[in-house]
Structure formats: C-alpha cells, structure tokens
Amino acid sequence: MNSEPTNTAAERSGGIDPDLIAGVVIVLGAGVLLTRTTDMPGMTALLPVTMLSALIILGILMIGRCALRHRRRTTASIKVFDNAKRFVGIIAAIAIYVAAVALLGFYTTTAVMIPVVAWCFGYRSLKGVLLADLIFTGGIAIVFVLLMGQELPTEFFLR
Amino acid sequence: MYGNLIDALPSVLSLGNLLAVVIGVVAGICVGALPGLSATMAISVLIPFTFGMDPLVALGMMAGIYNGAMYGGSIPAVLLRIPGTPAAVATSFDGYPMAQQGRGGYALQVAVVSSALGGIVSALVLMLLAPPLAKVTLLFGPTEIFWVAVFGMSAIVFLLGGDVLKGLISAAFGVFVSLVGADTITGAERYTFGHLELLDGINIVVLLVGLYALPPAIGLLEEVRDFDTENTGRLNTTSIWKAIPGMLKYWKTWVRSSIIGVFVGILPGAGGSMAAFLSYNEARRASKNPEEWGKGEPEGVAASETSNNADTAAALIPALTLGIPGTAVAAVMLGGLLIHGLQPGPMLFRDNPEIVFGFMWQFLFAAVLLIFLGGALATNSFAQVLRLPRPLLGAIIISLVFIGVYSINGRMFDVYLMLGFGLIGYFMDKLKFPLPPVVLGLILGGFAEQNLRLALRIGGGDWGILASSPTAKILIGMILLVVLMPLFSRLRRSRKANRVAG
C-alpha cells in the first residue's frame, strides 16, 4: 500500500514479485501449522487457530494485491538483495562459524573467523585484522573466563 | 506518589550504577554514529550480557545507550549526510551544509546540547506522568488488561504508518511465536515439535537478537561502500562551554521541539523520526528566515535533535505503565525488563519501585551526561568511529550475537533458533514488513491470552464479560478509533486525489 509502483523491480527480481512469494509462503506455512491444532484442547487451540487463520487470510489478501498489481502491469519497488552473491557468502560464513563453534570450540573458531570474514568481505589490512582479532577474542576470554566464569563451547583440544 | 522517586535516588548514585550509565552513553554514541546500526540493535546485543548484573546496572546501560545513540546518529548525518539512525535524517538537512562550510564541529555541539535538553525534558515528563498513570491502571482487571494488550497491538500496526497489511501479518506472527511451548493452564504442548527446549516457550532475547542484531551485521558485510570521511578530520571545534551562550537564542525551538518530541513519544507507534520531522517543519515555519533552512541553519539541527531525544523516555510511559511499548527500542527495553524478572505494567511500580524509579533517574543522568561528552576532544573522537572498517565490525557483531544468545541457557539450540529468526528478520526488513509489531506480538500475545482466559473463567464462559465494564467499553472505543482513523484519512486522501485528477 505504501510502496510506489514501478515496473523495473520485476526485472530485478527475475519477474516474480517478492510480495507474491512472501504471501504464498505465509499461506502455506500457516496452513500446515493449522493442521496441528486439531489434537489440542479447545481453549489451548483458541489463539493459535485465530492467529493462523488471520495469517492465511492476510496472506491471501497479499497475493490478491500482487495479482492486482500484475494486472495493472506494475510491481512493488522492492529490492531484496543488495548483492545476492555476497548475501550467500555471508550466510555460508555464519553457518560454517556456528557449526565450527560446536565442533572446534568458541575461542579457536572465533580467532579464525574474525580475520577470515573481515578479509574476505573487503578489509585488507593484515595488521589491523590481527590486532582487532587479538583484542576482541582476548577481551572476550578475559571477561567470560576470568571475570564471569561463564563457559562457552569448549575447545576441541580441552575435551 | 512521588516519595518512591526520592527513595530510589541513593541506589542510583552508587558508583556501579553511575558507571553503567556512562558506559551506556559512550557505547550508544559509538553505535549511533555507525550508519546501519541502531539503539535497538545495540540494546538487543547487550541484553543477554546483563543476565548476571544487578537490574539497575543493566537498565542504566540501556538508558545510556538509548540517549547516546539518538545523539550519535547526528554525527554521520552532519559529517557525511548519512543519518546514523532514522531519527537523524532531519538533522542532516542543515547539519551537512554546516559541515561543508567548515562548521561541522559547531553543528555537532548544537546537536549534543539540544539532545541533552530534549532528553532531560523527556525524563522529567516520565517521572511526572508515569506514577499517576500506573496508579490508575492498577484498577484494571483481566478484561481491561486484555483490551489494553489488543489496543497496544492495534496502535503499533495502524499508527506506525506504512503498509497496514504487512503490519498485521507481523503482529499475528509475533503473537503466534508467543504461543509456542506448553500451555500454562492445560499443560498441552503447542508447536514444540518434540523439542524439550521449546517447552518453556521462545525466549524473547532470542527473537530480539535474531530480528534486530543479525540483519544489521549481514548488512555491514553485504554493503560494498566506503564513506568519504574527509569532513571528520576538520571539525574546528571549540570548548562546548564557550559555545553554549551563543546557542541560548534557540530556546524557543528547544521548548517547542521538546513538547513535540514528548507528545510523539507517548503515542504508541510513532517514533523519533516522526518527532524530528514534525519538529523541524514547525521550527522552520516559525522561523524569521525560512529561506536559509537547508543551507546550514543551526536551528534546524537544534529542532531535530531536541525532539528525537525528547521522544526517548516519553516512549517508555506507555511501556512501563501499561506494558505497551510505543517504539521498537521501548519494546526491546521491555524485553530487558522481562529477562530480569520484571513484568512491565502497573504492578512494576508497586512491586519494584526502587528499580522503576531508579530507571527514570538513570534516563535523566544519561541526558545530562551527553553535555559533558560533547566537549571538543570527545566530539572529535566520536567522529573517528566512522573510520572503523565495516567488514571487521560485521564479523565482531556476529560473534557477539552468538555469545549473547548462547549464554542465556548455555545451549546451541537457542543459537540455531536465533539464526532462523535472523533470516526471517532480514527478509521481513527487505520486504518492508515492520518489525516492532512482531516484538509487541510476542510480549503481549501470551499476556492477552492469559487475561482473556482468566476473564472468561470469571464470567463463567460468557464472552459478554469482555464488554461488561465501562473501562472495557472505553478501551474498545479507543481500539476502533485507532483502527478506523487511518482508514478514514486514507479514504479522504484518495477522494481528494481523485478530485484533483478529475
């Protein structure tokens, strides 16, 4: 409703209105979750059924709005990715980081991740990267191990 | 009524609490100065680290961050014409031309003094209005509390502006998330998918960090741009105490903008950016030389910065008294209160007066502190924050987000959940789904359900009890007003546009 219509966005997103994809995902997701309310007691299911039904109706309205826009040959000016390749890279980096923390331990993984990610995404100063890594990882170790005594995922060589 | 306010003062004046406010203000200025990061994000990252802290220390840091970030946003707005926070957009209109004329340092000093004054007024209004309002809301029963929760959600969806359909979807999603876990009355599991970790529901911090902290970190790594930091090197700043007498001529703007900021702050759904724009327009209209505005008029900076800081504590009036956060930052702060076992609402004033009133004092101290941090050395130092390499910052935030969420329960499950919410938040942000209704839905959803079921039990299952009391009727009327008002105004606008086109 607030988006100024433009037809260049359709080209950017490969011809599919991102709102249409969102609408379909909402309707399908809420529909699947709604089927799980059948075995809940009446009062327990009251709010989930209300919310999921509302989501389905709102999702359908969103799809309808997209269809209307399509008929008028206009698309909402929504650019989903600033840089799709970088986005995929970032998500992969985060996923690898989280998996590696569980596998190798927090401090080892973080000490490697910070310089690698900063370097890969454009900060090319070896001295700066290593100094920041030392300060950050060392600082976290001082705060969490020495001051707070809080455990983060244990290092693989200490297990 | 105000005796508790005085009683809370000594504990706030302890070294630890004062230090927390100072650290918060400095951190807030740094975060606010970094385009793409906001007070909401900084507080979301901070909350998990405050678990082991005294509630007042944690709240002091949050109050400091909120005030600091509102001023910090003006630094890149003035020096680079890139607002650090959305609320600083109007500051760039005159701040940037001033920096181009070599008066960037003075623009930042006007910004810091105006921010401090706006913050002080806001904190005083919070101290004056919140206690009597909380006393009134203590009279509310389950029916009224249910309607208050519905009012809060309607207000944030319909008054936030933007796409109402998407706002409603966000709110419904938030309420749905609040329902995950074991039903507190029947014990039946809802959407736990066999995971024991979900039996207690989804921790608000996991959602907050996912929605508000991860997407900006992705954004920092995604953007391929360097800022032209040429202006940061030549601020020509003099001592702030010498500069203040020359600013006293803006007193009318300070008063007007404070009133606008406070009023907008109390309104649920409106935020600092709306306050800044309204205030800038009003100040320009009242000015004797409106043609100079936009070319480097310091009064424009004063108007915008006073009102976006006057919005801060005022936004907490509905949040603390009714449990309805009016802005995203207020919603995140409520999350901060909840993890310390403090349920926002009228009971907070009765059960934990020393904390809630101490929090108000901390807002006042944070605002006063801004002036002391606006000196020449500090202003120049904060301007250097803009030189921080963004990819490095992104990597560090990802790590901080991990630590914060992991340390809540010491389990990886919360981290995976947070990553899921982070992705949802990223796409919601890109597709222009508002995020505050999600948080509000999560906070108020369970609260509304609990009170609805309690009201129905009292009424013996009769739904008519929901509209039985005069207060409930007034609240229903207010909800209808909030829902219908924007629809009518939209209809009127479209009719007017049709008439012009026809």
Image (tube, rainbow, N blue to C red):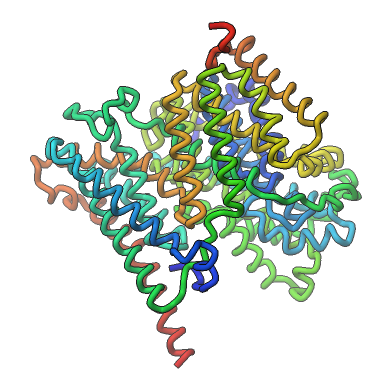
* Identity of the residue drawn at 56% across and 33% down: B45
B203 left or right of B113 in image: left
Give the residue drawn at x 66%, y 64%: B280
Residue B164 figure quarter:
bottom left
Image position, residue A133 (x, y; %): 72, 25
Does B263 sit above or below residue B335?
below
The quarter of the picture where the N terminus of chain B appears is top left
Left or right: residue B479 compared with residue B23: left
Residue drawn at x 41%, y 46% is B438
Residue occupying the far bottom of the picture: B502
Quarter of the image for the C terminus of chain B: give it. bottom left
* Residue B392 to residue B269: above or below: above
Could you say which is closer to the camera, residue A59 or residue B7?
A59
Q: Position of residue B331 (x, y in %)?
A: 47, 42
Whether residue B453 is visible, yes or no, is: yes
Residue A52 drawn above or below residue B276: above
How many numbered dots are placed on residues in this image? 0
Q: Position of residue B225 (x, y in %)?
A: 73, 51
Residue B491 image point, x, y percent = 38, 77
Q: Is residue B117 visible?
A: no
Q: Nearer the viewer, residue B55 or A156?
A: A156
Residue closest to the eye, B374 or B390: B390
Q: Residue at x 44, y 46 (%)?
A: B318
